[in-house]
Image (cartoon, rainbow, N blue to C red):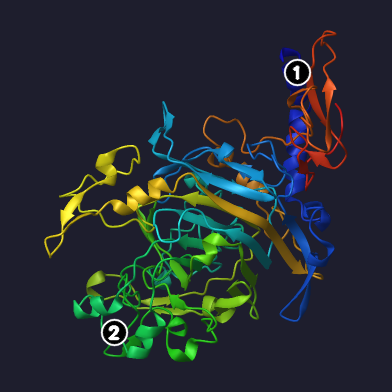
Amino acid sequence: AKGGSRWIRARTMALRTGIVVAVLAAAAGAAQARLEWVDPDTPDVQRTKRIGGVEHVLVFSDEFNVDGRTFKDGHDPKWTGLNGPVYTNEQYNAYNDSLAYTKGGNLILETTNEDWVHPELGLRHYQTAMLQTWDKFCFQEGYVEIKARMPGRHDVGGLWPAFWLMGNLGRATFTYSTDGIWPFNYDYCPPDDERDANQWGTQRITACGKEGEGRGAPEIDIIEVQPGDFVYDYQYKIDQGICPPVPESVLRNIATRQPFVSTSLQAAPGLPVDALERPTQGCLPTNFTAPDGTVREQYYPELYPSSENYGTVYGDGLQVAINYEFFGDEFTIDGQPLHTDAMSANTMLGKTHWDDFHQYQAHFKSGADGFMKFSLDGTTQLDLPASVVEAPRPVTFSEASGKQSGTLRGRRVPVEPMYLILNVDLSPRWGWNFCPSDRCDCCADCKQSRCTTCIEVDAQGNSYNSRQWLAELCDSLPAQYEIDYVRVYQPEDKVKVGCDPDDHPTREIIAKDLNAYTPFRMDEPLVAVLPGGANCTLADELPCGDHGECVRAEDADGDQAWGTCACAKNWTGPRCLAPAAGGAPAFQDP
């Protein structure tokens, strides 16, 4: 084994600088051939698709048909697994890159309730996986499709499986890279009298700067699934005076229950938190009276869930409701509050989405004739014309605020190079039942009965366990999020693939603050993907897969039966299990 390790070290040291540069440059270059990212296992019939009357070609695919693939940094040319705790949504989990693997022709992202412990980073009671194609595969505009089966149980909350896109200038979960970058899709330099309305000072790269264009890392959420059995009761909010009354037809349109999947375009800057146009969180937009006495509408009137918007903005072939619980989020950037906007809808799901595989799609195009469309099994969920995203929005402040009313300038359907992200999280912000901390120990550790048991008495005097749902979540683990394939298409005359395109470059910007994109205790953001190099035993059957060979180490004695993997042409990774893609080298020996 020592001989094999020396071989790997010598090879890596000799090639590190050149290969790392080549991998990052080639994976980001816009001129690379589109077929470099296409899985050879993708059927020919799936390599073109007519969408909206326009012929599209396949520019990326992963069929996950080769079992045994692993996704540790440096193992795969397309995907990189993350390690460590994540803080962006108050998660209870840490990521473990060994929990992402291929088996039975599918990608598996596994969730366990095993403790994750680190002497510097602390303790988490759950382990999950995140894969991302950051700075490897990116694309500008197109049609994305995933075929997946959800993890756990459809009627038990707690898990947060997701599939989403993000602009390459921000690396998901690396907050130093995303502050002031995510989810900006804004290109305007407002005059001084409109800076309050545009939350000026929160965007890091502005149209007022030397770049001359506002830049950011937009977010498109294709899958954010919330399992459970809770039924949202908007009428209760009306009865309690929390939200204003709405017509019966609107109540029917917004009927929401778990399980559901959220689909969203997130945008920054959004309507400021203290603007009178921003609706009360958890309530539908309504009308308000401005300081000048005029009656105005809140939020985006084009998205109001009236019957006229079903069959246009909202699909009428599925049970779809505006996501009135999430119109955006509030953060602080350098001491200044930033409120984002979310153009979002919830589609009700059923047990079948856990029992069977289903297709989730997103299609987006920028420009005046652009759009952002989401669909499930080919049926429309949410259809946003670019005009909704790009329209200027009035912003009205109360006189007491001391702020100047004005116009929030339009955002854009994303033009940035976008990369793919797959993950599962567990967070109290997503589908976890309310826990009365004055009566229960609201902990989250499956191994502690005080966390999964809290006996209470209902109005009829009956005892019940208000933490039973957590006990059932724990019983459902480990759980597997299964992905059959991921495919990306673009119009055949507008193929735009690469993480560092000429019209929206990212490499130099990233290089200026490389540490912000680099994992904890690592020297570089990405480890080079080399063909072969894993230690292997000659006696094992296919120790290097179908496309590699276990080559006897040069310094092995005659009775030693170990070596290192060497890959056939066009295959890569330590055990030769991944088709070469993008900038991954594809040579057979050192």
Q: Residue 230 carries which label?
A: none
User: From the image, which quarter does the C terminus lie in?
Assistant: top right
Is 467 located above or below residue 142 in the figure?
above
User: From the image, which quarter does the N terminus lie in?
Assistant: top right
Q: Is residue 114 left or right of residue 47?
A: left
Which is more toward the observer, 24 or 479?
479
Is 145 located above or below residue 476 in the figure?
below
Q: Which mark is residue 4?
A: 1
SS type, badge 2: loop
Instruction: Give the amino acid type for the residue marked by disc 1 in the picture.
Output: Gly
Which is more toward the observer, 482 or 486?
482
Which is more toward the observer, 387 or 212?
387
Question: Disc 1 and disc 2: Cα gap in Å?
Answer: 74 Å
Instruction: Give the amino acid type for the residue marked by disc 2 in the picture.
Output: Ala
Q: In this view, does 24 lie to the left or right of 161?
A: right
User: Image point 50% across, 50% down: which residue?
Assistant: 424
Q: How crowded is mark 2: few (under 14 residues within 10 Å), some or many (20 or more)?
A: some
Q: Position of residue 55 (x, y in %)?
A: 79, 75
User: Image point 74% across, 30% down: which residue?
Assistant: 17
Q: Can residue 61 be seen in this view?
A: yes
Which is more toward the observer, 434 or 462?
462
SS type, badge 1: helix
Mark nearest the camera among 1 and 2 is 1
Is 270 located above or below residue 14 in the figure?
below
User: Image point 85% across, 14% down: which residue?
Assistant: 554
Q: In this view, does 554 lie to the left or right of 365?
A: right
Q: Where is residue 253 in the image (x, y as percent from the top left)?
A: 41, 83
Q: Position of residue 297 (x, y in %)?
A: 36, 85
Farthest front residue?
Answer: 462
Q: Which mark is residue 290?
A: 2
